[in-house]
Amino acid sequence: MASALQNLSSYSEESVPDASTFHFGIVVADWNAHITHALYQGCYDTLVKHGASPENIHTMQVPGSFELPAGARILNGHHKIDAVICLGCVIKGETSHNEYINHAVANGLVNLSIATGKPFIFGVLTPNDEQQALERAGGIHGNKGVEAAVTAIRMAALRTNKPEGKKSIGF
């Protein structure tokens, strides 16, 4: 659902597992820092709100969104982490550079998730302009960082609470 139709900060708190046993990584792009740092604050605060210990939240800054997958891999290699959240903002602009960057980041994070079996969360805003980004970084459409944190907690819990029973083919 489009974020214009749903607030990114709205979720059922009862559906979020306790995060007190998990370790998280947050990789933040410095490009568009006034936006990405607002995403970071929403993300960090949400993790702590749901029980994550501040000493179990490891943060790394990278120059831009394109570097998020590499930063995520480095951070994951340096710490025992249950989920890595990648936060960035790629504003459309006058050329199609945003499409190349967004696809590269999404593919990189998917590949890391598949290769490691850990969740690497895509918390990258892909707006048409700066105003849309601000609206999704704590503005009228909420904060994508909150959504990314909730996703990370839920995915970390899924990863550690494997269901009992028959294994399906290939998994």
Image: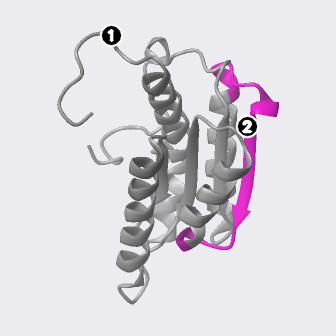
Q: Position of residue 62 (x, y in %)?
A: 68, 67
Spatial separation of the CA atoms under disc 2 and disc 1: 29 Å
- Name the residue at 26% across, 43% down: 1
Q: Which quadrant of the view contains residue 93?
A: bottom left
Res. 155 in view:
yes
Identify which residue, 65 or 170, lies in the foreground: 170
As shown in the figure, which amino acid type bears the numbered disc 1? Glu
Q: Which mark is residue 96?
A: none
Q: Is residue 47 above or below residue 145?
A: above
- Name the residue at 35% across, 85% down: 96
As shown in the figure, which amino acid type bears the numbered disc 2? Ile
Secondary structure category for the residue under label 1: loop
Q: Position of residue 45 (x, y in %)?
A: 69, 33
Q: Earlier in the sequence, mark 2 or mark 1?
A: 2
Question: Which residue corresponds to mark 1?
Answer: 164
Looking at this rendering, what residue extends furthest in the bottom direction?
Answer: 95
Task: Count how many numbered circles sit on residues in the image.
Answer: 2
- Stretch of the chain drawn in magenta: 48-66
- Name the residue at 51% across, 31% down: 150
Along the horizontal axis of the image, is 66 left or right of 42? left
Identify which residue, 54 or 6, lies in the foreground: 54
Q: Position of residue 53 (x, y in %)?
A: 76, 25
Give yes or no for residue 152 being in the magenta stretch: no
Give yes or no for residue 64 being in the magenta stretch: yes
Q: Is residue 141 above or below residue 23?
A: below
